[in-house]
Structure formats: C-alpha cells, structure tokens
Amino acid sequence: MYRYIIYFLIPMFILLNVVYSEDIYVRLIPEEVVSEGNIIKFNISIENIPKVGDIKYYDGTEDGGCKGVDIYINYSPDYLKPYGFNWSDICKNEKIKSYEFKNGTFVLSILFNKPIEENFYIGEIMFIPTKKGETYVNISGVISSALGIKYDGIQDYYDYYTKTFKKYPKTKFFGAKVIIKEINETNLTNTSLKLSETIEEKNFENIKSTSTSNIINRIYINPQVRKPEVIVKEINITEYRPIVKIIVNKKNDYDISNLFFGIILGIIFGFIFSKFKK
C-alpha cells in the first residue's frame, strides 16, 4: 500500500515543483542582518526570469524576459536612516531609471533597453541603524515582460506549444529581518549619500537645453479691416474646442465719417427717448 502512495506522491511533487519553479522571485539579500552599529546593506535580486520565447502565443508572438521593474521597499524610519543606493553593473548604463527615499519608502523604477533573461541584481540599498531592536524591511512591486505585461499570475494567453490557455508567471517578494544590537554614533553623524535620482529627467533637461526650437507664446493676426489690430492673448486647447481670448487695440486716429454717423445716431436716439417720456 505504501508503494502506491509513493507512486501517487512522486508525480504530485514533480507537478508542484514545476509550478513553483515558474514563479519569479524578488529578494532582499541577505534575508537577515545583525548589525553592531555598522551600515546595513541589501542587494535587490530578481530571479527565475523566463527567457524570451518561453512564453509563446498561438500566432507565434514571443514574450518573456524582464523589460521593466518597479520596486517599493518599506522600512521603519525609527530604526533605519536611509544612507544611499548604488545601481548594479547591469543597470547603471540604462537611460530610463529613477529611485527615491521618502517617508519610510524606497521607490525604484527602471526600463531596460533590451529584456534581461537571467538572474540579476538591481542594486544595493543601504541604511544606518538608529535604534536598538528588531525591524523588518518589506518589498513589493511589479516585474514586466518584454511585451510590457505584468508577471502577476493573472494575465493568460493561448499557448503555442500546448494549444491550451496558460497564465503568465507570478512574482513573489521576500523581504528581510534586521536585528540592531548596537548604535554607532559616528555612523549617525554621517551625511547620507544621494537619496534620489532620475536619469530620464536629466536627459530630458539636456535635450531641452540643446534644442533650437522656440516656444511661441504670442500670435499676431492681421484682420481684413483697416483700423483694429487684433492680438491673440491666450489660447486654451481643450478636448472639445479651443478657447481664444483677444484684445482689440484701436488706433487713436478716427475717420470723420464715422464721427458724423455717430452724432446722427445720438440725435435720433434722443428724439425717440423724449417721445416715450411724454
């Protein structure tokens, strides 16, 4: 009887192992740090990424790899002071990326020029311990494929190989535990490294500074009349229609015929008004 149970459990174990191996892992390494007052460092690791082509649609479209990463790391400001972040070698030359420490959260985003198809480190995040005790550093976020689809275990596709519907892998996140035994006063007085960086915005600023194009903020219109000069003061483009505010600047010279016509109209208006008054 035990033999039949073993025969049943072996394929179940293999099946579960296959399903488990499809998950993508985002980890803080090491998973536990004991600090005697020294600076605490974690590597952010992404593991078990499917290769481009491992996911293949019925029409031959291939997907896989890691094209984009958004990471959120929550830490306790009571125990940890942000010290800085260093990009890994595989990330440091990418043009679209950013990170920021703010109010107990570290936010990171990066878009790769070419999908990554192997395990890799995003970078190293560093903290200064400020209080004795135990605390946890939690991590979450989104990993996206070459086609920009989230690895969340929800999106499905019709598989080219099995001719069945399958789901994209899901991503599992693993944080870390921090045990602080001592506080180093020297470290506490250290100034933090750069706590934010946005490479994309820097590139955009460089493009703007070297551009030869000019922003036109005043438009002149020459109307088909002799006297008024119309200046378009403001143009607000909305989803439905443009709204234009104009100012009409009239010249100081007047045509004598216009003046005479205005006097005649005034006399006629006065005569009509006196009749109604009686």
Image (spheres, rainbow, N blue to C red):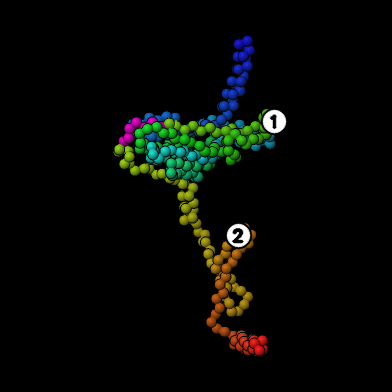
User: Looking at the image, which is closer to me, 242 or 181?
Assistant: 181
**Residue 18 percent coordinates (x, y):** 59, 25
> Which numbered dot is residue 238?
2
Q: Amino acid at mark 1?
A: Lys
What are the residue bounds of the magenta stretch?
178-184
Residue shown at 46% from the left, 38% from the top: 73
Residue shown at 61% from the left, 31% from the top: 54
Residue 136, picture quadrant: top left
Q: Earlier in the sequence, mark 1 or mark 2?
A: 1
Q: Is residue 183 magenta?
A: yes
- Any part of residue 89 in sight: no
Q: Amino acid at mark 2?
A: Thr
Residue 24, picture quadrant: top right
Image quarter (top left, top right, bottom left or bottom right) of the N terminus: top right
Q: Which residue is mark 1?
A: 163
**Residue 9 percent coordinates (x, y):** 60, 17
In this rendering, which labeled residue sits more in front, label 1 or label 2? Answer: 2
- Any part of residue 274 in sight: yes
Question: Is residue 18 left or right of 71 when viewed as pictured?
Answer: right
Q: Is residue 158 magenta?
A: no
Residue 76, picture quadrant: top left
For the residue labelled by badge 2, is the local secondary structure a helix, a strand or a loop? loop
Mark 1 Cα within 10 Å, few/some/many (few <14, many 20+)?
few
